[in-house]
Amino acid sequence: MTRVAAIDCGTNSIRLLVADLDAERSTLTEVDRRMEIVRLGQDVDRTGRLAPEALTRTFAACDRYADVVRRTGATPVRFVATSATRDVANRDEFAAGVHDRLGVEPEVVSGDTEAELSFTGATRELAGSDLDHPFLVVDIGGGSTELVLGDPGAAPRAARSVDVGSVRMTERHLAADPPTLRRWLRPAPTSRPRCGWRGRPCRCRRPAPSSGWPAPSRRSRRWRSTSRRTSRTGSTTPTSRPTTYAGWRSGCSR
């Protein structure tokens, strides 16, 4: 019987599990389990860096977890970091802080590895059950979401990790708490150039106005007025612009 500790550091929370591992029986007996919200991924989607205040919160949690690990006598310790740490430029600063407090290097796992670990954790105890399988596991995190299909006790058949998580979506779309109706009626901020009517992308690659819906160009206004005149008269004569989405993209007057 070996006492081990595992720390899962995600974009929003950090978790600790201390357990007694019976390698022969492949069983775990829980000794201590903790979770804290540290929001390590604060502003990572916008800046590409771990914020100083986010590192401070995370390192404080690591100090508390280090005390638990020493008190319980757990060894070895495994520290796994996921989406937020994958995406940042100052990863070394984070790794050094973790090593100073816990004596281990954090493993920054890929999206595929995270998906496999999520699937194993969710289905390990279902091996041998009479439940229909394969299982689809959906792990929604703060910075990414993993979708994994497979059978318990076996390698996943298919896995996909996407950069859609609760912290990313909150920072992109919820500027106020509670959200205001005006905010929901406006398009989400984006760094990509957008043009055309109501933010539809255009090949001209010019930026749209910074607030509200982008104003329609003169050409798009002419197209809309021509379309309305045609529909009122019931004429089958083609309009001056195509009515498909591709027609909007075919050109811009700006």
Image: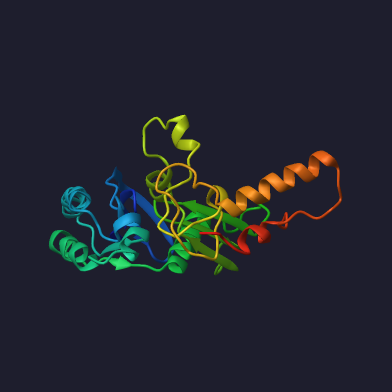
| Relative side of 195 to 243, left or right | left
Residue 92: percent from the left, percent from the top? 20, 68
**Point 45% across, 59% down: residue:** 163
Q: Residue furthest left?
A: 100
| Relative side of 8 to 200, left or right | left
Residue in the foreground of this view, choosing between 188 and 51: 188
| Relative side of 195 to 143, left or right | right
**Which of the image's four quarters has the N terminus?**
bottom left
**Point 45% across, 32% down: residue:** 182
Residue 228: percent from the left, percent from the top? 73, 42
Tell me if residue 80 comes above or below residue 196 in the rendering: below
Tell me if residue 22 comes above or below residue 183 in the rendering: below
**Toward which corner of the image does residue 225 lie, by quadrant?**
top right
Residue in the foreground of this view, choosing between 60 and 234: 234
Residue 110: percent from the left, percent from the top? 40, 68
**Toward which corner of the image does residue 103 lie, by quadrant?**
bottom left
Residue in the foreground of this view, choosing between 53 and 104: 53
For residue 1, say whether it is visible.
no
Residue 71: percent from the left, percent from the top? 16, 50
